[in-house]
Image: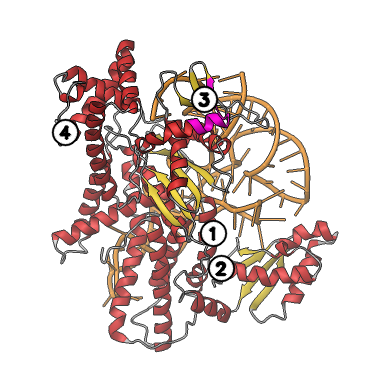
Amino acid sequence: MTMGSLAKQLSLIVGQAFEDAGLPVELGDVRVSDRPDLAQFQCNGAMAASKIARKNPREIANDITQSLAENPVFAKLEIAGPGFINITMTDEYIQNYIASTMQEERMGVAQYAQSNQTVIVDYVGANIAKAMHAGHIRPTIIGDCVKRIVRFAGFNALGDVHIGDWGLPMGQIISEFELRHPEWPYFDDDFSGDYPKDAPFDYADLEKIYPEASGACKEDEARLILAQTATAKLQEGHKGYTALWKHFLKLSKDHIKANTDAMNVEFEIWKGESDVNYLIPEIAENLKDKSVLLESDGAYIIDVTDKADKKELPPLIFYKSNGAVTYGTTDLATIYDRLKTYDNIARMIYVVDKRQNLHFQQVFRASEKSGYTKDGLDLVHIGFGTLNGQDGKPFKTRSGELPRFDQLIQDANEKARARIDEANLAADLSEEDKQDIAKKVAMAALKFSDLSNQPHMDYIFDLDRMSSFEGKTGPYILYQAVRIQSLLAKAQDITKQTTALSINNDDRPLALLLTQLPDVFDLTYRSLSPHYLCDHAYNLAQEFSRFYAKCHILSEEDDAIRNSRLMLCQHTYKQLDLCLSLLGIDIPEKM
RNA sequence: GCGCCCUUAGCUCAACCGGAUAGAGCACCUGCCUUCUAAGCAGGGGGUUGCAGGUUCGAGUCCUGCAGGGCGCGCCA
């Protein structure tokens, strides 16, 4: 049984007072004060109540505070302005709250899942034969973080890399190889032996040939038809093409895995669009029977409009007129496949560029029409913002080359590595340890700078800012965490008395911050916006740093005070560690 | 043409169901390493929240209109 945040507990108490006064309970909602100089918490319900009760809000506030005044948990209750109820708690109450919640594994954070529900998070969206670039950073970071948040909320969260391995680009590459190497067995329809085990090309060849093939198709319609035909033949199961395509798949998966590994991002599911190909005919039959799938201009479509719509929604194209499928088809089939494969799926969350919003509306609508969502399946698209250049305009793949994903990570690592020498703090460590620290610091910088903005906002690509170490950054938070670790390690030799926490003016702000975690997580989970969590971690780090600068901890002579402060350090570390782990950030031992 | 998103300090961004004096970081200025890690701390300057109306006791937040920017709209993914 979790206790909820301190503000939630107060809401119960104050809500009761409102109810006793014949007013709605919700009006007793208590939140952290906007004016910490005046109070710790505030309740704004009296203003809203004045309409219902037809009474002066200050009068209502007065009634409420009078009935609350008997409760010894309140150190101070004041009415301000038009009717704000300002609340300050006794230190004892805060201490008790911290003592009881901080011992818990979840530190007061609620469980959100009911029995064993599964949530699939679909992110990264890398494609075959296209090197991962700067544009993949966001979905990788956000998707991984969302998965961790959903998992901590209590769900069985599974990440699906969902590779783009089945569309026209496949036909473009296949036809390009066929033009260049017609002698390869993949193109000999009479070939009956075993195709080569290893690809006659490597990943570098592949990522070079794709843009060339794609470019050729743009210029020459006949060339495009070749590619389209090859795509359709692959999707129909052409043996040689399939063997060739498997080489692309293998090389591309290795590439993607190397990149995501470098970011410490994992996937439970390594599927792609192609994995549902075998299901498409049965889905098509089924949907035709239900009159969901309709013939139109030689293609087969699903009409996804609804009478209540105010805008036009184009249909989802299931089969193109040449018989090939689209990514709408495979996305729909993937939902079908997942529902068959996993029990008790509550949600699928797609972390994909917001420009795909219309596409997901179509797919989600088509799922409804197909009856896939009737058991309460919740389909969500987290559309993250566009990557812009320093001029504020979108980075364009054609003209300006996007920086490569691996290059970016390497640059960030090198920058962090240089900083270690500069700071001269880890001089006694081995080169290997320094590399490890650099990697953690670099990841903290990249991830935190990305996650601390709202996902849907466009953002400007600026490596210097993304990998800076000072101020509101990941490394700053790591630094505070490392300082606490260092303190706690030294403290072990000193004493291990169990003393009660006793807070005072110097550490009260830190203690109060610790009580906010359940609400911060709640907000983060409900909005699936990690930036609230980032904010909290930063506030904790900053508040700790103030406390650290102001107070003696190990050097404090009074045992009771020293132990209390050490305990606060311990709680702070535990909470920072949780927040950072939810953000996908590891804490080094030194820095 | 239709639809979606954005506009907050010089720059990059926050602001939970509408709450009090709109907050951070960077950059700039001033202090602080003889207490435990200065990747730090304390302090300062910097705002008509794009514009105009409206709703409300109260609007950066909700509604309407306008301006500027971005994006998307049947067989690319």
Mark 2 vs 3, N-terminal side: 2
Question: What's the residue type where badge 4 is placed?
Answer: Ala
Q: Earlier in the sequence, mark 4 or mark 2?
A: 2
The circle drawn on residue A199 is 4
Nearest to viewer (mark 4 / mark 1): 4
Task: Looking at the picture, tell me which residue is in the foreground, A223 or A81.
Answer: A223
Q: Is residue A98 visible?
A: yes
Which chain letter goes with mark 1?
Answer: A
Mark 3 to mark 1 CA distance (whole Å)? 40 Å
Q: Amino acid at mark 3?
A: Ile
Judging from the image, the colouring scheme is: secondary structure
Query: Badge 3 is on which residue?
Result: A301
Q: Which residue is mark 1?
A: A522
Element class at badge 2: loop
Whether the magenta-drawn stretch holds residue A386 is answered as no
Confirm whether circles 3 and 1 share one chain: yes
Over which residues does the magenta segment extend? A285-295
